[in-house]
Image (cartoon, rainbow, N blue to C red):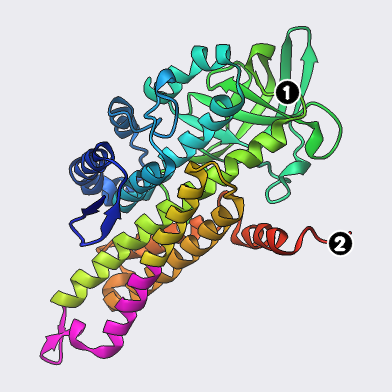
Amino acid sequence: MADSTADGVERRLPTDEARELLSLVRDIARREIAPRAAEEEAAGRFPRELFALLSRSGLLGLPYDPGHGGGGQPYEVYLQVLEELAAARLTVGLGVSVHTLSCHALAGFGTEEQRAAHLPAMLGGGLLGAYCLSEPSAGSDAAALRTRAVREGDDWVIDGTKAWITHGGIADFCTVMARTGGPGARGITAFLVPGDAPGLSAAPPERKMGMKGSPTAQLHFDGVRVGDDRRLGGEGQGFSIALDALDSGRLGIAACAVGLAQAALEEAVAYAKERRQFGRPIADFQGLRFLLADMATRVEAGRALYLEAARLRDEGRAFGRCAAMAKLFCTDAAMQVTTDAVQVLGGYGYTADFPVERYLREAKMLQIVEGTNQIQRVVIARHLVGPESR
């Protein structure tokens, strides 16, 4: 079943419910998100009230079980929702992706009692999550993390620092990977930590090139105590839980990248039709027409790749390699498309009077988060030829 958008892009949607959902999302994006995006990004303002609206609208738990407050939507649909949100404002699309990622460990590896106790509020109760894996000295090498959780009776006491945490300092809950055993991946366990837990504090937000409305901060755990009932999965299972979440999270980043690239393409096309030089619209010049054609091709190819990975996931098939490819290709495409959009607008593209300079700054971040694109190449190569020799 296809659905044609205002930009002429054909969406392949599996149900009438999905088509209605995407229509709702576009309406919210047009009325509530896009008009405020430029001003709020420039001011570094996080739109918490928008996330409350998204929660009330059922958009913060789309791929999860309806029995626990989720939307029961396949990833094929959820990712197209992310794309629409990111096209309106990347801070919102990425924020929903990170929130979904932060719910993954509980939804997929928690006990039924844990899910019943926490998931409804996380998915539809207005809460906002953070995903805490990276550390100052453990980014791409996440298995080297040092944050430690020590068992004390029925509790765990967590000490350490997490870095590059989206929603750091404003999240209501955090999924935290901490070391409970020896070195390496097998010594890591996952925990669900309340955002207001005593001993948990946030550093001032990082001063970033882009995404200024989305707070990214270090989180400090100083004797943070949580009960064993907030341990997710078995002891030592945390790293495999983290990797399982990242496979799905990479698809979220890919969809956001396509949304950002789509927004840049539309801005460039509209400008090219209106801007006149040498007595005619610059869209008449072949060099620029070819540039726009290449931009559009990258957007469509990225969309097709992330949707293919989503459909593999929805069918219960292995999708990790395709997810890494989608994250790699879509974010590189977004970087190229936003760069080209600035070029189409010329000097105006380099000013804050038009959004393409912001899109360019935001696209760079997407090549780094949830595994740099160099790490994606490592993942893809391992699927092709096996692990590296030691």
Q: Is residue 303 left or right of residue 169?
A: left
Query: Disc 1 versus disc 2: distance between alpha carbons?
Result: 30 Å
Q: Residue furthest left?
A: 279
Residue 293 spot, x, y in % from top left: 31, 78
Asked whether residue 227 is in view, the answer is no
Q: Is 358 colored magenta in this rendering? A: no
- Mark 1: which secondary structure? loop
Name which residue lies at 45% across and 23% down.
Answer: 122
Name which residue lies at 69% across and 44% down.
Answer: 136
Residue bearing mark 2: 389
Q: Is 294 colored magenta in this rendering? A: yes
Query: Toward which corner of the image does residue 53 lie, by quadrant?
Result: top left
Asked whether residue 283 is in view, the answer is yes
Magenta segment main secondary structure: helix
Name which residue lies at 40% across and 70% down.
Answer: 298
Asked if 177 appears above or below 34 in the picture, the reply is above
Residue bearing mark 1: 234
Query: Toward which corner of the image does residue 58 lie, by quadrant?
Result: top left
Q: Is residue 37 left or right of residue 6?
A: right
**Label 1 is placed on what type of residue?**
Gly
- The region drawn magenta spans 275-299
